[in-house]
Amino acid sequence: DIVLTQSPALAVSLGQKTTMSCKTSQNVDNFGKSYIHWYQQKPGEQPKLLIYFASNLASQVPARFSGSGSERDFTLTINPVEADDVATYYCQQGWEFPLTFGSGTKLEIK
Amino acid sequence: EIQLQESGPGLVKPSQSLSLTCSVTGYTITSGYDWSWIRKFPGNEMEWMGYITYSGSTLYNPSLKSRISITRDTSKNHFFLQLTSVTTEDTATYYCARNDYGTYFFDYWGQGVMVTVSS
């Protein structure tokens, strides 16, 4: 199975920029696409798709969110961070079965 | 608007079967897409369990071996999860979700249902 590694938590001040990483155990690029997707999950809610294919903003997601990366190294950026962004962020690979998720990065406000 | 809603018992005894329903509104499950079950464990780890396609084919996570079955009732626009021989390690929040063939990201999710396995 492809393993996705994320840092467990980070704290950032309101209005600042933050980045969180997702590193995969295998290359997930193919046909010009990176098969990495990002989700936001707030407490008590279901996950919400933020970014698909590493850098494409999902519908109705604010432009403060962006994604980048390739092969085995991916980044989710929030700039600027708002109070509403407190959540856990998961990456997920869609390249190989079984589909797998990272363990999530919990974002807190300083 | 597409909506998914899970339902089922919140408590299951060890060795018994867990059965959940996902009710879909706003889209007909036979029109397209794959329909997945995903669970989130108490430690926040998430696991994709498997899916049923719009045509009725299924694909399961090998980690669940022969314990899992995903079926559907097209007349009600529902799909189902059955997990047999549950243990306390199956305690989790269970989500149903939609994904597109070939892209394999989940664009619509249900609210989730928490299932505890305990005697």
Image: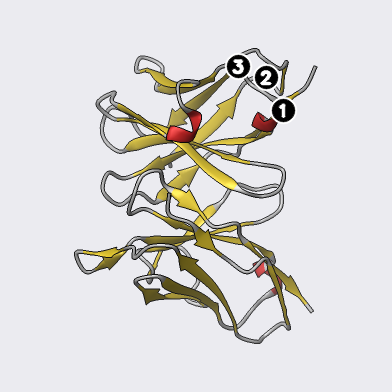
Which is more N-terminal, label 1 or label 2? Answer: 2
Q: In which chain is the residue bearing label 1?
A: B
Q: Is residue A91 left or right of residue A17?
A: left
Residue at 48% over, 75% down: A75
* Outermost left residue: A31
Q: In which chain is the residue bearing label 2?
A: B
Residue at 53% over, 42% down: B47
Check disc 3 and report the residue beneath it: B85
Q: CA distance from mark 2 to mark 1?
A: 15 Å
Q: Quadrant of the C terminus of chain A?
A: bottom right
Check disc 1 and report the residue beneath it: B88
Q: Nearer the viewer, residue A60 or B39?
A: B39
Q: Amino acid at mark 3?
A: Ser
Q: Is residue A90 left or right of residue A53?
A: right
Q: In which chain is the residue bearing label 3?
A: B
Q: Is residue A59 visible?
A: no
Q: Is residue B95 above or below residue A108?
A: above
Dividing the picture into quadrants, the one containing residue A81 is: bottom right
Number of numbered tags placed on the structure image: 3
Circle 1: element type:
helix
Residue at 73% over, 83% down: A13
Circle 2: element type:
loop
Q: Amino acid at mark 2?
A: Pro
Say which of marks 3 and 2 sits in front.
Answer: 3
Q: Is residue B113 above or below residue A70?
A: above
Q: Where residue B73 sits in the image (x, y, percent)?
A: 39, 15
Q: Residues within 10 Å of mark 2 (few under 14, many from 20)?
A: few
Q: Residues within 10 Å of mark 1 (few under 14, many from 20)?
A: some
Check disc 2 and report the residue beneath it: B9
